[in-house]
Amino acid sequence: MKMYAALKSIASYVPKNQVTNFDLEKQIDTSHEWIVERTGISSRFFASKDENTSDLAVKAGKIAIQRAGLKHQDIDMVIVATLSPDYLTMPSTACLVAAKLGIINKPAFDISTACTGFIYLLSIAKAFIESGGYNNILIIGAEKISSILDFSDRTTCVLFGDGAGAAIVGRTNEKKKSILDVHIAADGNYSNLLCTPRNTLQDQAKQFLQMKGNEVFKLAVKTLASDVENILQKNHITPQEIKYFIPHQANLRIINAVGNRLNFQDEQIVLTVQKYGNTSAASIPMAINDVYESGKLDSGDLILLDAFGGGLTWGSALVYFDGRR
Ligand code: ACO
């Protein structure tokens, strides 16, 4: 019997400290109106000084394991996507997370694909599961982006937030319960548009995130619209058959531009950017979890995901949710 990879659970963790646009107005030359009009963002959450990316990841990971009806002993692999790892070079955040969850003697590694992290995670986990050698893989997108934000640069610091989203990728025999298709891509020719330019360990002054927002915006709309159209066409699925379109939550205007091109109804489009800001690799699983916790995501629902981020990287996925209540 053919065996497919499936999204068995979803979970998230949001740090306690909510920072509104009005709070930022007190620190930098910006306004609530500008941020909402240009991005849709009203607030974001920042982790505390003693909370690291791995701590956020562990909190989401624990819930994902439990919601899949599993124990830590059942997890065969841990993969973390992050652009704000606990340590610059090593150990990987995934190794720290696995240890904190009691998962040892199993592979654990990080991937670096910025905001496209969760789509890449799905693609990697699907390949490992469908190779037959693994049963349950814990994937986590986790970020403490506040630790790499330049709070004197109003063009970037208002956009991002911290958080973690986790999922278990396991097995199913039913295609209509599976991770149906994932497409991932990159073009490093655009690497300078979105980066932390510290390219040597000595170069301390350039450790903060920088972005040419306008150019990224235009490329994101163009690339995502065709990426999403392609994955639907390839799988003979119409936008009407999608229960939820759950894009990376970077900017309301990017989401609406892609959503309108595909003629999605408002109730199909999931929006969390207004309260969480852009949480990079964590944004898609955090958004899926919001729908799940609101009681509106059922087993068998078909969701469409897309993301675009530093690298540049991008991708999309068609997933039948296979989680339980
Ligand atoms: N408050 C007030 N004014 C501001 C602020 C601010 N926070 N930031 C910029 N401005 C000003 C600028 O200085 C500029 O002023 P000027 O006209 O006098 O020069 C004006 O607002 C317009 O600036 P733009 O950069 O052109 O604004 P834009 O409409 O492009 O919006 C934004 C900027 C929100 C960053 C947008 O370009 C965007 O969302 N880009 C895409 C982001 C994205 O998707 N990134 C990918 C994922 S992120 C990742 O991978 C980590």
Image: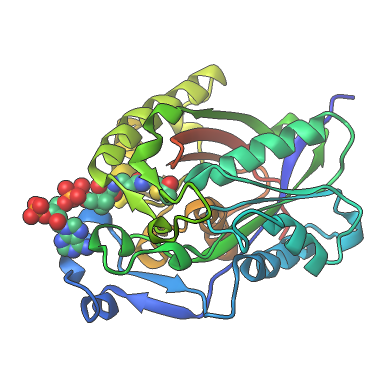
Q: As drawn, is 8 to the left or to the right of 251? A: right
Residue 31 in picture, x, y percent from top left:
17, 70
Residue 32 in picture, x, y percent from top left:
20, 70
Viewer-side residue, 273 vs 145: 145
Q: Could you tell me which quadrant the N terminus lies in?
A: top right
Please tell me which residue is depicted at 31% across the width and 32% down the height of the picture: 219
Q: As drawn, is 23 to the left or to the right of 95? A: left
Indicate the quadrant where residue 228 lies.
top left
Residue 260 in picture, x, y percent from top left:
30, 36
* Mark count: 0
Say above or below: 223 vs 43: above
Q: Could you tell me which quadrant the C terminus lies in?
A: bottom right
Indicate the quadrant where residue 130 lies.
top right
Can see residue 4? no
Say above or below: 113 vs 40: above
Viewer-side residue, 217 vs 242: 217
Residue 239 in picture, x, y percent from top left:
44, 31
Please tell me which residue is depicted at 39% across the width and 67% down the height of the picture: 275
Can see residue 211? yes
Q: As drawn, is 89 to the left or to the right of 47? A: right
Viewer-side residue, 221 vs 232: 221
